[in-house]
Image: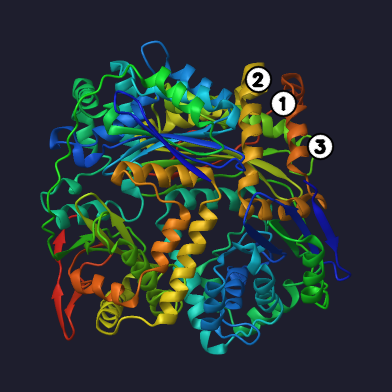
Amino acid sequence: MPIYQHIYENGFTLVAEPMQSLESVAFAFLVPLGSAYDSASRAGLANVVCEMTLRGCGERDSRQFVMDLEGLGVESGESVSVSHTCFRGAMLSTHLADVLPIYRDVLLHARFPEDELEAGRQVAVQELRAVDDDLSQKVMMELRRGHYPEPWGQSHQGDIDGLMGITMEDVCSQYAGGYRPNGTILGVAGQFDWDQLKDLVGELFGEWQMSSWEEPAAGMLKVHHAHLACESNQTHIAVAYPSAPYSHEDYFQAWGSVGVLSGGSSSRLFMEVREKRGLCYSVAATSRSLKHCGSVFCHAGTRADRAQETLDVMLAEIVRLAAGIEADELDRLKARMKSSLIMAQESSMARAAAIAKDWYYLNRVRTLEEIGQLVDALTPESINAYLKKCPPKQFSVVTLGLEALEVSVGVS
Amino acid sequence: MEFLEARLENGLTIVAECNPDAHSTALAFCVNTGSRDESKEISGASHFLEHMVFKGTETCAVEEVNYRFDKLGADYNAWTDKEHTVYYAVALPEYQDDIIHLWAELMRPALREEDFQTEKQVIIEEIRMYEDQPPFGADEQCEQAYYGGHPLANRVLGTAESIERLQVEAMREYFQRRYSPENMILAAAGRVDFDSLVRTAQQGCGHWERFQVERLTKEVVSLQGSQLIQRPAASQQYVIQLGNAPNMEHPLRYAVHLLVTLLGDSSGSRLYWELLHPGLAEQASTHYYEYADAGLIMTWLCCDPECTEDNVKVISEEYQRASANGFTLEELSRAKTKVNSRLVLAGERPHNRMIGIGLDWIRQQKYRSIRDDIAAFDAVSLDDISEVMRQFPLQDTYSVTVGPLDDLAWPTAPGSSQRADVAEG
């Protein structure tokens, strides 16, 4: 299937992938305002801005906004990452032309009712408080905060001082500068007519005024060690190390090595940590990418008296990657990837977001076919050459639990 | 979309919703067994057994199981609840037979002592993980109190103590008693070659010995009351309320699904406007669970401890208002659009259809297409919704709260309140 793309004069980018077997269509707006844009004294602002955009836009108050989306059967959601605010939805394809104008108003004509600021702030405060009770999220947040260069480790939940200090002026100025066409990417996937879609999006967003705001500067990854004391049943272990970013020519080599480590239940971490030793219920490693730097993040949770062994085995397996991977490990990974690429064609929501993110990282979209070819081209030799050149090292380690652990191997 | 059904001589039923336009094939063995079928002595055995199935057979060790699934590129897993254990895999259509062969082998597991002892540690870690997560076991505490001595009170995971005590012989005996082909079905959805499916199932499962399996069903005599579990280290306060609802065969079950959407959906519902939109709660929702002999409406609240008493009161008032005045046609119409739209969107993935048709069949020996479900939702009237609330009063609940609070006044009726029993956290 082709990927359609169009860049409007104001920089707004539309990318779209037809999925003819579906009745649905999905969209994902990636608006270039994430938590990295929050100032230290207003940590959590992007999240509050997102919440406030839903409290009335254009001719609609907040109640009418929700009723209109429900009336059209839209499954919608919003999220704020470090780089973007994402507004997404899925629906029967016949409703797309009625739904996109509503989101034009969200992005261009939010009403920001003064009397709803407190409620919007409280939604964000509740979300922040809930993280305190979610230990795996808490440990990963601390890992990102210390491992990523500032401001790229800032969580979208912010902090209580930041949230309490936010004024309506802050919200309006962040919206006016940060919600901008230059840098906004709209991904659409599913059933649609490209010519009609392109014209409709042009009519809705073509007049949106550009802004001079730019993404915060990139930076260098850091090595971060920390322990968060907590009277929990389990000790949580979070490890990160540098890897190739999504846009890098070595990305798929790095991705392959992480797949050998943690893709499927025959992978090394699952076999060594869970299956052979029964150390924990879940252990996983995943590739994560900022625009300019990539990382591998790993997590496991286990009881205090087995936590040291769990960390030791995890680090030993990560370090052992440098000694190389085997052909049959790569074969299994390729089989899993082939399936997941084909199954990706069954979810319009996932594809809409994926193609929008591709554009952010690459300024183009990789088709599923192209990704398949890149995976097919991987060989044990190519991955081992990458691992020789870039062996896992410079580990950031954050633990949460009763006692701190020794980080004994592979630390530089 | 075509529905097909076959039955092997030993009673194993095969059901499939075949969609030639799908990209994948989803396959599941659904076993009609869960925690409600366990005695106290083997609490947690169904779920532990589900883990042990992946440890392989007499001729296939765990490494080989994992290698074979991964070589097929399958997305596979399993889950256990109170009434079912479901083993599934989603893969490319060309691997349909290989997947069935593999699952069929695993459905007769070795249950080796050594694997049992290793996996026991994994299960205990899973239990400890959930004990650290909201609502910190309060959901199970609430179910136990609400159901009294009914088997639906049994915990799916068991407890660390019950798992520690469990012996492999007891699990083998449980397996011998529950995994009869007549107590299982093979469900498939997506791009399915049905003739080949039946043929492969016959080869892999046709020799399984059939025996009779029974489930003890009885009327739920639910309890009302409340409990407070103190957990000073928690940041938020959590509340669970359980109330009676129609069981899975009840003609009003579609009306209940719409009722909980109207009351406590994540957007646009009564609780959304009263608690979530004003920022008074992080989560406030209403859910419906259906079982063979019982139904359950669960209300869930997560909020700032200081707001909890007021929020619980708001929920009670909203439920009273709904019971007294019902809903508008416009509200009902929006709820129908929302529910039906979700059905269609979810139905695009064979994985979701496999679960849907598998559970429908194992529960009621019925096939319902998405269009059938949409028609059933469309037929629900405002009177049906009111009838649910008349027959199953929303106010009659058992409530448990867990969090930093050391006291909470529960609303019982307008103008009065009741203090909670305090339990140790």
The amino acid beneath tag 3 is: Glu
Q: Position of residue B308 (x, y in %)?
A: 30, 73
Q: CA distance from mark 3 to mark 1?
A: 14 Å
Which of the pair A234/A225 is nearer the observer?
A: A234
Mark 1, other Cα within 10 Å: few <14 / some 14–19 / many ≥20? some
Q: Secondary structure at mark 1?
A: helix
Residue linked to disc 3? A249
Q: CA distance from mark 2 to mark 3?
A: 20 Å
Instruction: Provide the chain ID for the residue under circle 3.
Output: A
Instruction: Provide the chain ID for the residue under circle 2.
Output: A
State if disc 1 and disc 3 touch (CB < 8 Å): no
Residue linked to disc 2? A325
Instruction: Provide the chain ID for the residue under circle 1.
Output: A
Which of the pair A17/A290 is nearer the observer?
A: A17
The residue at the point 80 percent across, 48 percent down is A2
Q: Is residue A351 above or below residue B274?
A: above
